Image (cartoon, helix red, strand yellow):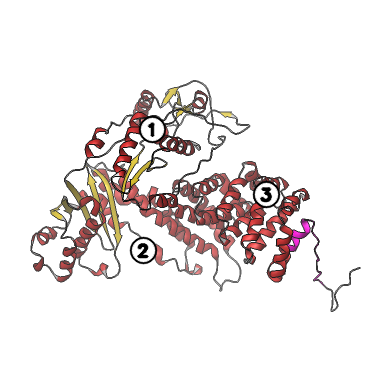
Amino acid sequence: MDDQVQNRHWGGGQCELQGECTIHLKPGAVQTVQPVRRITSALHNKLENELKQLKEQGIIHKVTNPKEDLNATIQRPYYPMPTFEDVAAWLYGHKRFTKLVAKFGYWMPKLSEQSSIMTTFNTPFRRYRHIRMPFGNVCAQDIFQQKMKETFSNLEGVKVIADDIIVSGKDDEHDRKLVCMLERTRKEEKLAAFDAQSKEVELKTDASKYGLGAELPTHEKIVAFASKALNETEQCYSQVEKELYAIMSGCQKFHQYVYGRKIKLYTDHKPLETILSKPLSQAPPRMQRIMLQIQPYNLEAHCIRDKDIPAADALSRMHPSENDEFQNEIEFHLEKWDLSKRFKKLKQCMMSLSQETFDAVVRENIELFDLKYDAAVQDAIKQFSLQVVIESCELIRNILSDDDIREEFNQVQLYAKLLVEEHKIISVATSLLKEHSSSAETAASLLSTLSNLAIRNEFCQEIADHGGLSLVFETLAVHATDRSCAKWGLALIKALAGNDDIKHLIGKMDGIPPVVLAIMHHLSIPAVCETGCLALAALALRHPQNAQRICDASGHTILVDALKIHETKPRVIKAAAKAIRDVVSRDRSLAHHFLDLSVEELLNAALKKYPKQCESEVKAALRDLGCDIHLKEYWHGGINPVKLD
């Protein structure tokens, strides 16, 4: 099998997917010309060389015509992206796996002539246009996923997720499937590259006061990494015990890579060379227990300087720890805070991936060994920064919850204004959502934060101006089966629809079908269903065009199904009844959509079952549907009720 793989190891040339792609524009798209971006003189030659290289590879071509501002005018062809749950279910029972990556994936689809002209861009030297799909195009992900799925769709045991290709099998059938996949890539002129495995590996470990770090470098690149936070007991270990513990953790983490092979172990702790070379009986009891765990591994210890293990050193200090000052301050009293200083620190935490963490902690050591742009190091930092983003979002939600009973008046508006106007939290959150949209947990936390901030008209408008609408619809499409993303995405749409201009914009940009689709995916989940019904109610309120769009997207069927499925949930019934009322209140001609589905019987049954919880909303829906309903007059002047004629 190794020989077969080696025979299919091709160079790093550019590959191409069959067929041409066409970019479709929205109606009324207007041509624009963007000015040339200024660059420093130091980058002038590098940019020119890069453009020449792209031209020689057939990625771009010189043009003289104006271009269009694409992303704002492209009609995105939504294509379903497999989720983690889909892949996990597909992999069930399989025991052998191979993962391949399509390098420069978006450059594989070739653009049609008309679409190529649309991608014209300015440089200080001349105009160019993309011959292949450019990175950053709003439709690139959908087109690339579709092309890749078409290419490998008829291959058994092959799954495509964006630029990742997974081959799996239960036994030797995995090898057969992998060979078939490689033959397909050769036939289609795709790129497939594999790294040869040597009989010797390197392992670098390090320990700090509160954590452990490990890296597995191969051919000058880090191919795997690990980090672990120490608990209170482990933090009391001596430094030599922590360093030995880091070795054990690294070996166990990378067991599938290092077991059965000679391991060159690199550490910055000199005593370990002597300790590991002595008999086990001569070590202290605690170290004996740790050394027993690493007995199965063939270790050869070497001591090097700490600056020679930059990634392991950085990862040992970049772990989610219970002792972080950031986490200790989750419980707070607002009057004891210096809010301005605290929010500045919060902003630094949220932007740690791109600004603080990578640059300040790792730059010095990484620059020494030319690893600044190593993808593995950046992936390590990204992984740990996601937890920082999630906890920062939780902190913002705590600030905006304002549940301090000692305060006489609600302070949410004040805190939200401080966050938005002085600390640009909306801009930060939307940027992070765009950057981390592939992580469902992170995306849900950011959507929740934005929905809590959308409490004023101007804040809603700012979210829309920063591309919040496109981001929420994209998140609902990418994480269609994730209930947290669906719930908070729908909550954000409900909040934004409180602004009449944005409500109109959502309808105009065909945003209602994705909302209906998100509710349909999670119709059986009460919390998501309730939030979705309230989002439809907000979109239809005083907007007959949106009400018609809801019915055109089968939203009326979803609302009736919500009443049927959640007949024992008063909160869902109230939300669905409110949505029905808002849909038909301005356009009674839409009532037949609901009446044809026997909604009158469902509403009357709910009214009879929950007269106190749902009476107002259900009766309002029945009234606007044109059904017979008895309304009570509760107001009375003086002692006796008013007598109505």
Label 3 is placed on what type of residue? Asp
Label 1 is placed on what type of residue? Thr
- Quarter holding the N terminus? top left
Q: CA distance from mark 1 to mark 2?
A: 40 Å
Q: CA distance from mark 3 to mark 1?
A: 44 Å
Relative horizontal placement of residue 255, taking residue 574 as reference (left or right): left
Q: Position of residue 165 (x, y in %)?
A: 37, 41
Q: Which residue is mark 1?
A: 40
Callout 2: SS: loop
* In contact (CB < 8 Å): disc 3 and disc 1: no
* In contact (CB < 8 Å): disc 1 and disc 2: no
- Upstream in sequence: badge 3 or badge 1: 1
Magenta stretch mostly in which secondary structure?
loop
Q: Which residues are magenta?
A: 618-635
Q: Nearer the viewer, residue 569 or 176?
A: 176
Q: Residue at x 67, y 48 (%)?
A: 550
Residue 629 is inside the magenta segment: yes
Between label 3 and label 1, give the one nearer the viewer.
Answer: 3
Q: Nearer the viewer, residue 440 or 542?
A: 440
Relative horizontal placement of residue 375, taking residue 547 as reference (left or right): left
The answer to whether one can see residue 462 in this image is no
Label 2 is placed on what type of residue? Asp
109 is higher (above) or lower (below) than 587: above
Q: Which residue is mark 2?
A: 324
Near mark 1 (Cα within 10 A), the count class, few <14, some 14-19 or many ≥20, is few
Residue extending farthest to the bottom is: 639
Q: Which residue is mark 3?
A: 500
Q: Residue at x 62, y 42 (%)?
A: 510
